[in-house]
Amino acid sequence: MERITRPETLEILSCMGIELPRTTRLPDDVLDKRLRDALNYSQHKSGLPPSLDPERLPRWPQGRPLFKMLRKVDLAEVREIENAERAGGVYERELFQDVFWDLGQTMMAIGKALDSGRTWCVVQDSEQTLAVLLRFLCVVCVDSDTPGVVLTYWAINNETGAEGADWICMQMRRDVGVTEIKATVLEMKLLLKVLAMNARLLPPEYKPPKDPLEKHFKLSVLFPLAPLSFDVLGKLNSDVGCALCGKRQASRCSQCHSVSYCGAGTSSLPCQKADWPSHKQTCRSLKGGHWVTIPFRMSFPGEPNNTILSYHSDIPTILDEFNYTLRKALGAENGPPPNIHGEKTFLVKLQAPEGAFLIYDRRKSFHSVFFWREDDPTIYDQCIAEIRGPRIVYGGRKMYRWARRTGDFQLSVCLDREPNTVIKW
């Protein structure tokens, strides 16, 4: 089985919310560590014991469904599901566009197979060039909300396909129900990486009996998979150093000030020059831009800034009961929204309902935060003039702009420059 390549590592990290330039010179081992850290966080492994002995742990309660336990959704997705249901539809998302989200769907399919009494399954791509064979041994109860699916697995390709077919035939003689899960090759490579990482949690003395055709199979365990929390994203996205090589940053791009590079003066030129093909589009759209400071809040003017807008207010189109619940779950009533971007420049959407701008980023790390005219009339009027002025788009209802987080409740926004990039949210 081929290892995950460098470009594939960057793609997976991006899907998990960790943005690094495609031209980065960070060493392969540094990128791999960041991916391993992200995968560990996504399984909440820091809360697990260092070793899990399936022979001593209690079994997951029979009849308690695993379908939704093996993949956790983040609150932004919960909100999208809720909105779709309120509109009388069903939340749908296209497969094979986001490898980490796809892996979550595979985890749900594994849970469904277990709920149906299946003892094995096959994960493979549509061209059948690669497959991962899984046989479930048991499901242990790590804690009240954390199942651990103990299994044995083997990845097969065209060269080993005949042996894999023999194994499948043997399984079908005992369990005729077939669970075939479609996946991309990259998703299977990611699944195999997770399995290899998790195998270390099983004690070496744990050696359950193997079937006759399982001499190549390995033991591992799967835990629920979840999107990275905002505090983890902030940790993994911050302190990345030079945008290209990762060394200690010393200077920003002199044209747009949106990215940092190592060295100072001419010593930063090698990395800055190498990063130019990736950075130039953003740089040109920001060069000479008019930056304004926008204060935002999660409350009405005059109230403490950490007081969430009540859904009993007279602006239900802006914030309804679900958004209220969402903000509470994010812990927003106890402090400012998390900063997952560090000092990086990122895109924000500014929507202009009556009385206040609604602001959020692509990952909705801050959501239902508002810029009220009372907080800065001059800047507010500039924003209104921009959203309805010569560069008007979307009927003057919203605009996208580059921003930087400059305080707990403060953004610096490049007001007069439209992003020169494709935006799909």
Image: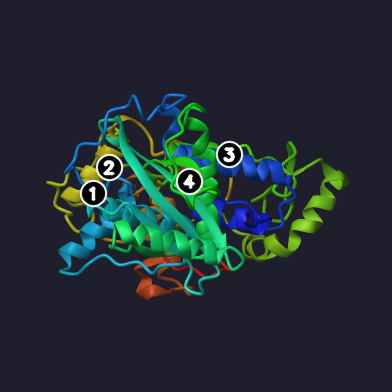
Q: Earlier in the sequence, mark 2 or mark 3?
A: 3
Q: Is residue 201 something that shows in the picture?
A: yes
Name the secondary structure under disc 2: helix
- Residue 422, given in percent of the width and then of the height, sits at 52, 70
Rendering quarter of residue 416: bottom right
Q: In this view, which residue lies farthest toward the right?
A: 266
Quadrant in which the C terminus is drawn: bottom left
- Residue 11, given in percent of the width and then of the height, sits at 58, 58
Judging by the rendered image, the residue that carries numbered circle 2 is 327
- Whether residues under marks 2 and 1 lie with C-beta atoms below 8 angstroms apart, the answer is yes
| Residue 190, above or below 228 | below
- Estimate how packed mark 1 is, as few (under 14), some (14 to 19) or many (20 or more) residues with alpha carbons within 10 Å: many
Quadrant in which the N terminus is drawn: bottom right
| Residue 329, above or below 421 | above
Judging by the rendered image, the residue that carries numbered circle 1 is 323
At x 84%, y 52%, the residue is: 270
At x 57%, y 51%, the residue is: 19
Q: Mark 2 belongs to which amino acid?
A: Arg
Judging by the rendered image, the residue that carries numbered circle 3 is 238
What is the number of the mark on residue 411?
Answer: 4
- Estimate how packed mark 4 is, as few (under 14), some (14 to 19) or many (20 or more) residues with alpha carbons within 10 Å: some
At x 31%, y 48%, the residue is: 75
Q: Earlier in the sequence, mark 4 or mark 2?
A: 2
Q: Mark 3 belongs to which amino acid?
A: Ser
